[in-house]
Amino acid sequence: MPGGDMAKPLLGRRNMESNPDLTPAAGRTVGILGSGDFARSLATRLVYSGFQVVVGSRNPKRCAGLFPSAAEVTAQADAAKKTDVIFVAVFREHYSTLCDLTDVLAGKILVDVSNNTEINHHKESNAEYLASLFPACTVVKGFNVISAWTLQSGPRDGNKQVLICCDNQEAKRIVAEIAQVMGFTPVDMGSLSSACEIENIPLRLLPAWKIPVFLALGLFLCFYTYNFIRQVLHPYIREQKNRFYKIPVEVVNSTLPCVAYVMLSLVYLPGVLAASFQLHYGTKYRRFPDWLDQWLQHRKQIGLLSFFCAALHAVYSLCLPMRRSHRYQLINAAIKQSTLGFIALVVSTLHTLTFGWTRAFDENQYKFYLPPSYTLTLLVPCTVILAKIFFHLPCIHQRLRRIRNGWEKGRYVKFTLPSATGEYSSGESSSNV
């Protein structure tokens, strides 16, 4: 990457001028060992955050043009002498090349930013390995979950959290302050033994999607098997009709809206359970069970997968006559935005009830005594809608709103609630309100 481009990141000095509190007090000098892409992005970000940067390279003359003009590019030994905090931006297999600097690095803080190519590729983490090579230094693991692009463009366009771990609290505090000045949010992950876990994080593929994807696949498999028995297996056994041609298109197309419908309901069901939990204990400060907490955190992914299934159903419907696809067309509106998503859930439920009300009482619709698939999909949505209606009853809604504004059962507290006109009125409450 040319030096001119690196000298003009998307995060300019104007942000520093508008936030003078971000400027380090004494303009701390920070060192970097390495001249790769991450080292160049890190140097650029440090310079524009107000730090004095010294870069140590094995070929300083060749690499000087790749760094911002404000950064000093020199030999590794010279860079190590000029600062007490040094970012080690080299690969693990190159750590041994720094052993010649053992005496110069003694007493320094080394920030290991490296990652592995595989999860648990080595018995010990890179940071622990670096600490074993330089026992006279204090090694801090950090910045490995931040990409080079994020360093250049700013935390608003990427991950803001910097995970930090170290056995020395003072060293951890210093690195955390550097991260804050750069605009990131430091997160204390404990001792250096946590470095292995931190190094595995960038290697995990979409960790927040694992549970929602397995949920979607499980629902698809269940509904597909159910529809296969009703639409293909039952006619073949009872009427000797070969309808196996329905397997790739029609059975899949009748399965997708069921999955989309149920998953859209599962977006709102944890909110209902959370409200019930708060009403039962009379406080918002009690921690939810782990399973409910995880469910609440995965609502976005579940909603997006619901929309994906609905969109895929629309594509499949193009392969069928319009008369076959009109029955599920309203489910294609299953988007995840809070209000619109719930409206889509209500409309889809009304549509399904209207469509299947007469069929639900038709004996011919029960294949192998199995009810139509749409009747099964109504269980969760109807539960969610009825619970939402219950929570919007004035007496229940008022109590739930007080809890979410800080009121606790059994305690006498003051609270402020918005009135119907938008103004705020103060009040007092105790456990008997």
Image (spheres, grey):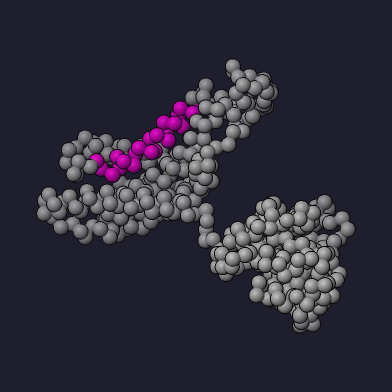
Q: Name the quadrant containing residue 383.
A: top left
**Residue placed most toward the observer, 159 or 105:** 105
Q: Is residue 148 visible?
A: no
Expressed as whole percent of the image width and height from the top left, the position of residue 102 reads: 79, 72
Image-based side of 242 in relation to 423, left or right: left
Magenta segment main secondary structure: helix
Label total for image: 0
Image-based side of 397 in relation to 105, left or right: left
Q: Is residue 270 visible?
A: yes
Expressed as whole percent of the image width and height from the top left, the position of residue 156 reads: 67, 56
- Residue 381: say if magenta: yes
Query: Residue placed farthest to the top in the image?
Result: 432
Residue drawn at (32%, 49%), measured in percent from left and top? 222
Image-based side of 418 in relation to 25, left or right: left
Residue drawn at (30%, 37%), measured in percent from left and top? 354
Q: Is residue 419 above or below residue 372?
A: above
| Quadrant of the image containing the N terminus | bottom right
Image-based side of 320 in relation to 148, left or right: left
Q: Is residue 288 above or below residue 68?
A: above
| Quadrant of the image containing the C terminus | top right
Residue drawn at (86%, 69%), measured in percent from left and top? 82
Expressed as whole percent of the image width and height from the top left, the position of residue 283 reads: 59, 29
Q: Is residue 255 above or below residue 342?
A: below
Residue drawn at (28%, 51%), measured in percent from left and top? 225
The residues colored magenta run: 371-392
- Residue 176: say if magenta: no
Expressed as whole percent of the image width and height from the top left, the position of residue 231 reads: 21, 51
